[in-house]
Image (spheres, helix red, strand yellow):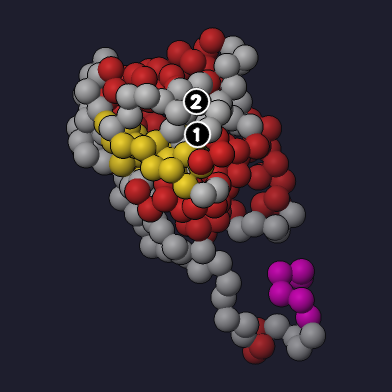
Amino acid sequence: MKMIEGLEGKGIAVYCASSSAIDSLYFEAARRLGILMGQSRARLVYGGTNIGLMGAVAGAVLEHGGEALGVIPALINAAGIAHPELTELILTDGMRERKAIMEERAEAYIALPGGYGTLEEIFEILTLKQLGYHQKAVVLLNINRYYDPLLALLGSATEQRFMKPSNLGLFHLATTPEEALEYIASYQPGPAEAKWLPPKLSESKQGEVPGTE
């Protein structure tokens, strides 16, 4: 595997499953992502455990020369599943503090396949980007077409005007770890689009609901 230029010292948050019962192809992708990050001297920011895809990514990063910051709530840490070899471990009082620290310490975000926690974390990052709180790179790593049903849902939300079509551009869809990291390495933020625009009564009839014409 090659070193990807432009990632050295960059904090990349990786959100992913803690399950160890999933197909081995997801573990292969997680390890490949970790190897590339380590060789490129990127800094992993993640949930701090040594299980599931989380443990696979962290172990590979550390084995190949990278650094790993784990952020873990005290309740989860008490279960004895924190990775023992992390560069840095931060204990938090709860999940909200954990997510805030990860968001602050990362310069880009990748979501590998995962369940409730992964989806919640990446959607919070996308919401913050939509609202203009950050303009960092966000990547869905669509291993084994895992995110295809989610993409269909987002397409439906756009068609029914729950979202602007431009919202689909808030993230990049990658199919390989290499593509995900190369996108982050070359990412340049574009102009932020306001979620809400000031109402222009001169352009719509009074009492008419905007966007329903």
Q: Quadrant of residue 198?
A: bottom right
Main SS of the magenta part reads loop
| Residue at screen point 44% across, 33% down | 48
Report whether residue 121 is seen.
yes
Residue 46 at x, y percent in the picture: 42, 36
Residue to which mark 1 is pinned: 77
Residue appearing at x 55%, y 48% in the figure = 94
Q: Write down the region rendered in magenta.
A: 208-213
Q: Is residue 128 left or right of residue 6?
A: right
- Tell me, yes or no, whether the highlighted magenta stretch contains residue 180: no
Q: Measuring 45% from the left and 13% from the top, which residue is drawn there?
A: 28
C-alpha gap between disc 2 and disc 1: 6 Å
User: Badge 2 is on which residue?
Assistant: 81
- Mark 1: give few (<14), some (14-19) or many (20+) Cα within 10 Å: some
Q: Residue at x 56, y 67 (%)?
A: 195
Residue 59 lies, with reference to residue 151, above or below; the image says: above
Residue 114 locus on image (x, y percent):
59, 30
Q: Nearer the viewer, residue 160 or 70?
A: 70
**Which residue type does callout 1 highlight?**
Asn
- What kind of residue is marked 2? Ile
Residue 52 % position (x, y): 52, 21
